[in-house]
Amino acid sequence: MHAGELTRALKVEAERLGFDLVGIAPATPPPHAERLAEWLAAGYAGEMAWLARNAARRIDPRQAVPGARSVIVCGVHYRAAEPDPALWNDPARGRISRYAWGDDYHDILLPKLRALQAWLEGRLGRAQIGRSYVDTGPVLERPLGALAGLGFQGKNTLLIHPRQGSWFFLGEILVDVELHYDAPQPIGGCGGCTRCLRACPTQAFAGPYVLDARRCISYLTIELKGPIPRELRPLLGNHIYGCDVCQEVCPWNQRWGRFSAWPEFRPDPERVAPRLLDLIRLDDEQFRARFRGSPIKRTKRRGLLRNVAVALGNWGDPLAVPALTTALNDHEPLIRGHAAWALGRIGGAAARRALETRYAGETDGWVRDEIALALAEA
Ligand code: SF4
Ligand code: SF4
């Protein structure tokens, strides 16, 4: 079958499977791919050392999948209607990034991508023509998306479609088949705008198009496994899982941001603006039950409760002292240390008593340091 005809049929099938966007690029290093090495060398990846381990494979899709000739990039909208702003802005509730309001997109998108790959294999009459990836593959998703015509990379580093905004997931299929390629989007769609750079709560942009992940709330609340740096904790506000600020302020989203038609990404009300005091009390089993099928399970209980403790400290209400006192005695040192910080922020006699009692019996060196600093503050 002619490449153009096959490509047209493939796009019809992608649409039938529910994909909102589909574009196709040659399997070559996307423009500016070498910036990954510069970004890694600057240390902006923080603890995401796995990005450095296979940087060469990431830059060139042919190294990720030998023999690859084309990259099929698919997008799915995930934006859902925002909650009542009164809930959203309540510091007693946690903010969760929109992409995590519904089911885990890895579990939803990968079978769809594999179905599209299987359709293509059926048309070609041969198997194993390539590999499908969602998020975790050794590929530069956004630059490849730009090369496949799905949008331009904004100064916030996200892929922005000029008629559909940036609230979409990406998935890729690398195949050894020649297809008809889409025209890349021209760069520079941001013009003179700098809204995202100015609105970032932690000033995480080292400059336009350059994110210092070590300061980004998405990294700090999801990727980072250890303690959140003390100086950044007050800047997190009530963000407990990811952050959408640099997408919310983007004029392309305000004008064009589409809502998702996928039922899997309909918000679970428990995940949109949950009460912090409910979350800090979750034990292991309750955490697993509440976040089964959700991307939030990725942080594990200790990561989420670490974030919740920081948000409770930022709320600053003495109502949180009893629950934080329980958290100060948790079996996880990471939770104990952040609960100590929060109690120090809230202060008062009850918080101080709890800190002094725990300090007397604490054996973990890092937690003892956190308690000592919290006592100094309280
Ligand atoms: Fe800043 Fe939030 Fe965007 Fe990260 S996700 S760069 S913290 S605005
Ligand atoms: Fe570009 Fe402005 Fe959107 Fe940032 S907010 S990505 S600068 S258009």
Image: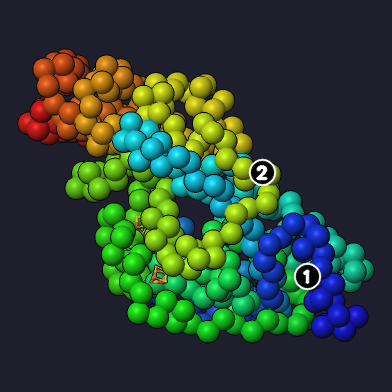
Q: Quadrant of the N terminus?
A: bottom right
Q: Nearer the viewer, residue 113 or 258?
A: 258
Tell me which label, 2 or 1, sits earlier in the chain: 1
Contact between marks 2 and 1 (CB within 8 A): the answer is: no
Q: Residue at the spot x=82%, y=76% of the render? A: 8
Crowd around label 1: few <14 · some 14–19 · many ≥20 (10 Å): some
Q: Residue at the spot x=39%, y=61% of the render? A: 249
Pinpoint residue 89: horizontal percent, then vertical percent: 35, 40
Ligand 2 is found in the corner quadrant, namely bottom left
Q: Quadrant of residue 283?
A: top left
Pinpoint residue 330: horizontal percent, then vertical percent: 33, 21
Classify residue 277 as left or right of residue 301. Answer: left
Q: Nearer the viewer, residue 28 or 164?
A: 164
Classify residue 318 as left or right of residue 311. Answer: left
Give the residue number, with chain letter if any, for mark 1.
11
Q: Residue at the spot x=37%, y=33% of the render? A: 93
